[in-house]
Image: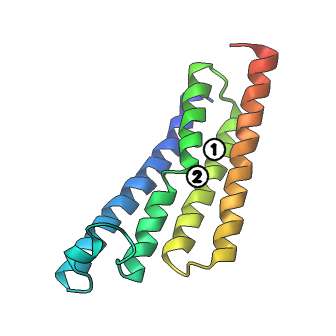
């Protein structure tokens, strides 16, 4: 296994973020064109968007929060040459949980399910950071 395999889950996470971004923009333009929201209503804030558009936007914005720590870890792990099979497995688990979280967010939006997926992803990411830190501490760079 090459350490650069870590870029594959990173690319999937990036693709998810861009997919939600483009979906959000298409949905918003459609909402304005269909007259479900007026430009003046959303000029100063997001609260006037219809529910569906808000769900997609919230899911997109969520991809700009916790995944930032994933991207940083991936970059640091690659620079320090600390990627191993466990790190790669956990990276795929994190991305799978983010995909599931986004799915729930834009479909049923069931908060308990979203929370479980979010917390699970956060725990996986925390374990990844802890393992990375331990490897740095005991193996050096």
| Rendered location of residue 38, percent (x, y) | 22, 80
Q: Residue at x 49, y 50 (%)?
A: 13
Left or right position of 84 against 48:
right
Residue that numbered label 2 is attached to: 95
Q: Is residue 108 visible?
A: yes
Judging by the rendered image, the residue that carries numbered circle 1 is: 91
Q: Quadrant of residue 19?
A: bottom left
Q: Position of residue 118 (x, y in %)?
A: 65, 61
Q: Report whether residue 2 is seen.
A: no
| Residue 31 point in image, percent of width and height | 26, 80
Label 2 and label 1: CA atoms lie apart by 6 Å
Instruction: Give the residue at x 63% y 70%.
Output: 114
Q: Is residue 112 left or right of residue 33?
A: right
Q: Nearer the viewer, residue 127 or 10?
A: 127
The secondary element bearing badge 1 is classed as helix
131 over 80 or under it: above or below? below
Colouring style: rainbow
Q: Secondary structure at mark 2?
A: helix
Check contact, mark 2 vs mark 1: CB within 8 A.
Answer: yes
Q: How many marks?
A: 2
Task: Please identify the residue farthest to the right as the structure is shown.
Answer: 138
Above or below, comparing residue 127 to residue 55 in the picture? above
Q: Residue 130's spot in the image, x, y percent?
A: 77, 35
Characterize the local packing of mark 2: few (<14), some (14-19) or many (20 or more) Cα atoms within 10 angstroms: many
């Amino acid at each position: 296994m090459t350490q650069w395999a870590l870029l594959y889950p990173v690319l999937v996470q990036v693709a998810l973020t861009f997919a939600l971004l483009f979906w959000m923009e298409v949905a918003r333009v459609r909402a304005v064109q269909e007259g479900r929201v007026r430009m003046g209503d959303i000029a100063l804030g997001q609260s006037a968007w219809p529910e569906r558009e808000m769900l997609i936007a919230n899911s997109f914005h969520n991809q700009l929060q916790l995944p930032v720590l994933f991207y940083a870890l991936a970059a640091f792990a690659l620079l320090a040459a600390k990627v191993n099979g466990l790190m790669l497995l956990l990276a795929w688990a994190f991305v799978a949980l983010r995909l599931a979280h986004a799915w729930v967010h834009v479909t049923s939006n069931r908060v308990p399910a979203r929370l479980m997926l979010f917390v699970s992803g956060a725990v996986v990411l925390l374990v990844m950071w802890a393992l990375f830190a331990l490897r740095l501490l005991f193996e050096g760079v």
